[in-house]
Image (cartoon, helix red, strand yellow):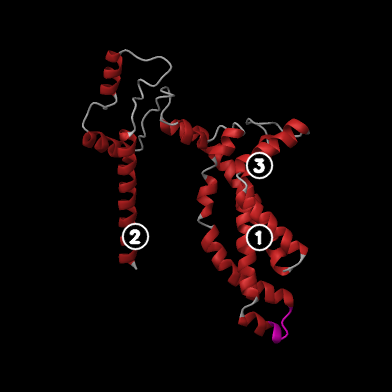
Amino acid sequence: MARYIVGRLLGLVFVLFAVSLITFLLTRAVPGDPFASGERELPEATQIARAAKYGFDQPLLVQYGRYIWNVLHGDFGIPFQSPSQTVVDLIKDTWPVTIRVGALTLLVSYPLGILLGLLAALNRNTWIDYGVTFGSTLGMVLPNFVVAIWLILLFSVGLGWFPTGGWGSPAHLVLPVIAYSLLPTALVARYTRVSLLESLGADHVRTARAKGLAERRVLVWHVARNALIPFVTIMIPEIPNILTGSIFIEQIFRLPGLGRFFVTST
């Protein structure tokens, strides 16, 4: 067991190293100069001085070594767009917003998806099942930024119930969380329904019912417990993706979160 854990950790280190190297080389391969891409082009002497200051005049191997050394010491550098702050400072300022939106999305989407999947499975081939199936399919194919725009037009512009964007009050969270919860709710509902239907048709469930066990006991002890296994395997890895935020949701609702830096970072 110890050898397996060590092997997995070494594999993780190798993957992180490979990703960092590929990312570093790709950023260097992109044409353009961060010092010459502003609204006003800097003099050549100033560009050379800044390149020397940040080590861009060094060989790639030296630059990569310095980059890895700084990262291992928690130094991610200074963003060119906000030279008065460090990257760590920007993450500290924006991460709580992204985490709050992601956590609320989890609290809404997972329980709601489980409930809808349960209702669909227990009422198979009824209007409830058809409605949940259609709704989950629609939620999986509709982009969340389209839903976000519809929500703004209806509840902000039309009805005036919620602000169109910004940050500062609980009302600013309602529409982003609803738009962001659509896809995970649809996925959870679909996987829950499929898992429960497979468990309901299993031999041990039919045996439990034949023995005269109460339906509630059959559902809780023989159906739900087995149905959770594939659900946990598939949906638990989605939690980090939800917590790291949505670029489109944060941009549309003007949330000061971490996702916008995926677009504006250089």
* Picture layout, residue 25 above or below residue 112: above
Looking at the rendering, which quadrant does residue 251 occupy? top right
Q: Which residues are magenta?
A: 209-214
Q: CA distance from mark 1 to mark 2?
A: 33 Å
Q: Position of residue 199 (x, y in %)?
A: 62, 74
Dot 1 or dot 2, earlier in sequence: 2
Instruction: Kindly identify which residue carries mark 1.
Output: 114
Q: Residues within 10 Å of mark 3 (few under 14, many from 20)?
A: some
Q: Which mark is residue 16?
A: none
Front position in the image: 190 or 260:
190
Mark 3 vs mark 1: which is more N-terminal? 1
Q: Is residue 66 left or right of residue 220?
A: left
Residue pointed to by mark 3:
147
Where in the figure is residue 51, as x and y percent of width and height? 28, 23
Q: Which residue is mark 2?
A: 8
Identify the secondary structure beneath mark 1.
Answer: helix
Q: Are marks 3 and 2 in contact (CB under 8 Å)?
A: no
* Residue 54: quarter of image: top left
Which residue lies at the image location 33% right of the left edge and 65% below the top edge? Answer: 4
Q: What amino acid type should be assigned to the residue bearing mark 1? A: Ile
Q: Would you place residue 143 above or below residue 185 in this image? A: above
Q: Which circle, 1 or 2, is nearer the viewer?
A: 1
In the picture, the quarter occupied by the C terminus is top left
Q: Nearer the viewer, mark 3 or mark 1?
A: 3
Note whether residue 160 is visible.
Answer: no
3D distance between C-alphas at marks 3 and 1: 22 Å
12 to the left or right of 180 = left
Q: For the residues carrying marks 3 and 2, which lies nearer the camera in this image?
A: 3
Q: Are the residues at dot 1 and dot 2 in contact (C-beta closer than 8 Å)? A: no
Classify mark 3: helix, strand or loop.
helix
